[in-house]
Amino acid sequence: MEKILQVRDLHVSFSTYGGEVKAVRGVNFDLHKGETLAIVGESGCGKSVTSQTIMRLIPEPPGRITGGEIIFKNMDLIKMKETEIRKIRGANISMIFQDPMTALNPTITIGEQIMEGIRQHEKVSRDEAKRKAIEMLSLVGIPNPEIRLKQYPHQFSGGMRQRIVIAMALVCEPDVLIADEPTTALDVTIQAQILELFRDIQKKTGVSIILITHDLGVVAQVADRIAVMYAGKIVELGTRREIFYQPQHPYTRGLLQSVPRLDMKKGDLIPIPGTPPDLFSPPVGCAFAARCPYAMEVCDRVYPLKTYLSNHHQVDCWLQDERAKKLVSTY
Ligand code: SF4
Ligand code: MG
């Protein structure tokens, strides 16, 4: 399958008064054309920082990309200057956030806002931009787009506003859409409609989606593959089936315990006893060891090697790894 984006050994830190927080600690994944990859985990696991780094939206400083590559169309996004990345943002890779109001200007009609987005990246006439804006609004299911174009954000419901934000994100036909908790602010019925819209748009446009969420119900509805993040690392990655039906990492199992089926409607992550480690000085071994019921001596000492369980399914856990025995004997 064609790889549209490759994230390689990404490290991101933030300097604070308390020291350097290592928020992302060696993240690797590929995004394939036309797929939805969900990144799940508790808040603070590094999933939002990872996605913001792809867009180069983390504030530098206090943020700092301390290592890795993000390859998009044979270019490393990390090495790009701000002027270059600005051309990519919106046109090739675009992003939508939890609260649609933060993306919309309350004092400008939505038509002007969408057209502005088009004309930032493409040299088109006003009429052409308007035609495209109307087309996008109907793509995202806004009725009477010619009339709605002239209205302001407050004249739309929350769900409709999120549709407008999605239209704005898609207007330049990006290859990649990053959606960070796109339905968290919406009620469950509207949420289901927006998720349906994502699927629909993906079918029509072939856009690749990275979906950041803490909600396993959302993941079950739309993800093709799932990356589970813990303490700045992807600890398990697999197809939706593999993660929901054959989870191997004790953390993934903990997350899924309350929501074992694909058909559940709402499945927020139930907290696992204990707290994630301090990322000022992350553990050298498995970061989940302090909370893991299966922890062995090796777990504290050495970070687990990646084990491949299928073409798609990989896990960082000593339980799955024959090599653990040998390592134990060397200590
Ligand atoms: Fe638990 Fe060890 Fe696996 Fe970490 S590596 S999840 S501590 S068994
Ligand atoms: Mg977040």
Image (spheres, grey):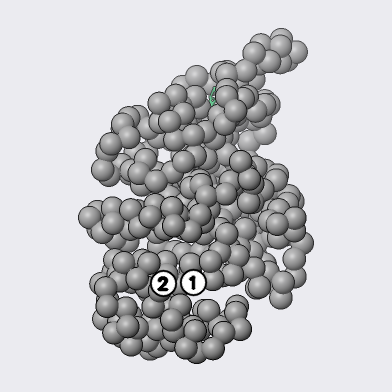
* Quadrant where the image shows the N terminus: top right
Query: Ligand 2 near label 2 (Cβ, under 8 Å)?
Result: no
**How many residues crowd mark 1 within 10 Å: few (<14), some (14–19), many (20+)?**
many
Q: Position of residue 5 (x, y in %)?
A: 64, 51
Residue 106 shows up from this direction: no
Tag 2's secondary structure? helix
Quarter containing the C terminus: top right
- Residue 195 visible to an observer of this rendering: yes
Q: Quadrant of ligand 1?
A: top right
What residue is shown at x 60% (from left), y 79% (from top)?
122
From the viewer's perspective, tell me whether residue 148 is left or right of residue 96: left
Up the image or down, 241 lies above or below 91; here it is: above
User: Is 44 positioned to the left or the right of 27 in the image?
Assistant: left
Query: Which is nearer the eye, 142 or 303?
Result: 142
Residue 289 pos. (x, y %)? 54, 28
In which image quadrant can residue 253 be found? top left
- Quickly name the residue at label 1: 171
Q: Mark on residue 136?
A: 2
Image height check: is 242 above or below 322? below
Please indicate whether residue 273 sits to the left or right of residue 85 in the image.
Answer: left
Residue drawn at x 43%, y 81% as measured from the top left: 131
Quadrant position of residue 76: bottom right
Q: Amino acid at mark 1?
A: Val
Tell me the residue at 26%/43% (across/down): 265
Circles 2 and 1 in contact, beta carbons < 8 Å: yes
